[in-house]
Amino acid sequence: MKKALHIIKTTLIWLVILLAVSMMIFTVVSVTTFNRNDRSLFGYKMYIVNSDSMAATDFNAGSLILVKEVNPAELKEGDIITFMSQDTDNFGETVTHKIRKRTADAEGNPGFITYGTTTDTNDETIVTYPYVLGKYESHVPGLGTFFNFLKTTPGYFVCIFTPFMLIILYEGLKFFNLFRRYKKEQMEEMQAEREEIEAQKAENAKMLEELKALKAQLESGEPAAVSADTPCDTTIGDSDAPNQL
């Protein structure tokens, strides 16, 4: 039973450690990769969706989307693209909308008319090739919301700081218990040594008293006392034997 509990406890500790480390790695990767137009991983970029403009057909706000870098000339009607908006109300923001059709701007530059499927309203500005960041591939619902929470102070304390503090506290308590056990064993050993020394002293004192008593008897000319347990052989000589008839 104790062995099973020890295995369970060890497993839980390692799970907490892996969770905390994973959260740290995820935070570092997300900060350096998510929502970064200048960063890609194996030709893919990741963005957090901030609105429900595509919720009617594809993904909701808070989703993490995966966008693949492509040649804009290969895009077609119905594709979903991520681009830097040139509209007046959200200029410079990253937007992911569906292509309604191919077209060209006033200067003849090729581009796309895009729209959000929730409102089915065309974006104000034609998206020309230089502003296309990639083609939408897939998404993970809710992961963007979790990442945004992780970047906040409560998220840091809940997902990273608290697990590490629990591990530190557990290891501290384990060290304290081991130290206390060591001190207890050390005190028991010292107590046993003292008792052994006291017993030896008592034995030496007893032997000393016996030697003093023996010395006193020798000096007084008295025969030494013989222990009752000491065997004694008595030999009767011929002079002491009764006369035979």
Image (spheres, grey):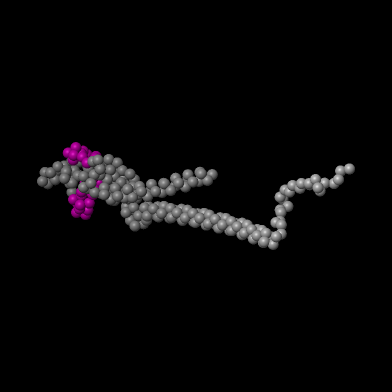
Q: Position of residue 231 (x, y in %)?
A: 72, 48
Q: Residue at x 32, y 54 (%)?
A: 151
Q: Is residue 88 magenta?
A: yes
Quadrant where the C terminus sits is top right
Q: Is residue 110 magenta?
A: no
Answer whether residue 187 is visible to the viewer in this image: yes
In the image: residue 78, left or right of residue 191: left
Of residues 202 and 69, which is closer to you in this image? 202
Q: Residue at x 47, y 53 (%)?
A: 178
Q: Residue at x 76, y 48 (%)?
A: 234
In the image: residue 99, left or right of residue 152: left
Q: Position of residue 66 (x, y in %)?
A: 28, 43
| First to last magenta residue range | 68-96
Outermost residue on the right side: it is 245
Outermost residue on the front side: it is 239
In the image: residue 143, left or right of residue 91: right
Q: Position of residue 91 (x, y in %)?
A: 20, 53
Q: Residue at x 81, y 48 (%)?
A: 240
Of residues 52 and 169, which is closer to you in this image? 169
Quadrant where the N terminus sits is top right
Of residues 120 and 192, which is closer to you in this image? 192
Outermost residue on the left side: it is 107
Q: Position of residue 103 (x, y in %)?
A: 16, 42
Answer whether residue 177 is visible to the viewer in this image: no
